[in-house]
Image (cartoon, rainbow, N blue to C red):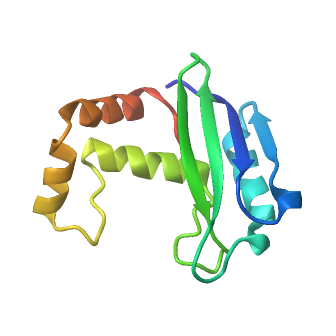
């Protein structure tokens, strides 16, 4: 599988002194990105909100995946502090292999069936790229 070579993150919300961008490279880039997010986690909203973080994962073949994390305090139910989990969850949703608990099976199938090309592309991405 094709490995990630770089993860770039820019904090877009929160205390202005903390709104910076960082890049993580090499074989530990997923882990290093998560550590950086976690070290700031005490500054993320605990109730009612999140701090946006834009991110881009670049893989060894030049392919990129871009998205946005909605980071919350770690005491929240889903603090969105793991880049790989965020990417994998979204791609699995699109591929039709990860139905959220709040969705009925028929509603989920209707959503993912809307664009078969997205479903196929997500499944192909998961088959080719290493997202731990």
The residue lying at 15 percent from left, 52 percent from top is 109
Estimate the x, y position of residue 82 in percent, counting from the top left. 61, 56
The image shows residue 7, relative to residue 45, as above or below, that is above
The image shows residue 23, relative to residue 93, as above or below, that is above
The image shows residue 27, relative to residue 35, as above or below, that is above
The image shows residue 86, relative to residue 46, as above or below, that is above
Looking at the image, residue 108 sits to the left or right of residue 2; the answer is: left
- Quadrant including the C terminus: top right
Estimate the x, y position of residue 61 in percent, counting from the top left. 57, 16
Question: Which residue is at the front of the view, 26 or 122?
Answer: 122
Q: Residue furthest right?
A: 17
The residue lying at 23 percent from left, 67 percent from top is 103
The number of callouts visible is 0
Estimate the x, y position of residue 120 in percent, counting from the top left. 26, 31
Looking at the image, residue 19 sits to the left or right of residue 2; the answer is: right
The residue lying at 63 percent from left, 70 percent from top is 72
Quadrant in the picture for residue 46? bottom right
Estimate the x, y position of residue 57 in percent, counting from the top left. 61, 34
Question: Which residue is at the front of the view, 114 or 83?
Answer: 114
Looking at the image, residue 69 sits to the left or right of residue 12; the answer is: left
């Amino acid at each position: 599988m094709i490995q990630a070579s770089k993860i770039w993150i820019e904090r877009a919300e929160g205390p202005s002194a903390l709104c910076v961008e960082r890049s993580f490279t090499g074989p530990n880039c997923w882990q290093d990105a998560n550590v950086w997010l976690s070290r700031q986690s005490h500054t993320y909203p605990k109730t009612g909100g999140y701090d946006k973080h834009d991110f881009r994962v670049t893989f060894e073949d030049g392919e990129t995946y871009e998205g946005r994390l909605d980071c919350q305090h770690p005491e929240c139910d889903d603090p969105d502090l793991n880049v790989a989990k965020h990417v994998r969850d979204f791609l699995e949703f699109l591929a039709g292999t990860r139905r959220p608990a709040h969705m009925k099976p028929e509603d989920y199938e209707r959503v993912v069936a809307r664009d078969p090309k997205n479903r196929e592309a997500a499944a192909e991405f998961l088959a080719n790229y290493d997202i731990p």
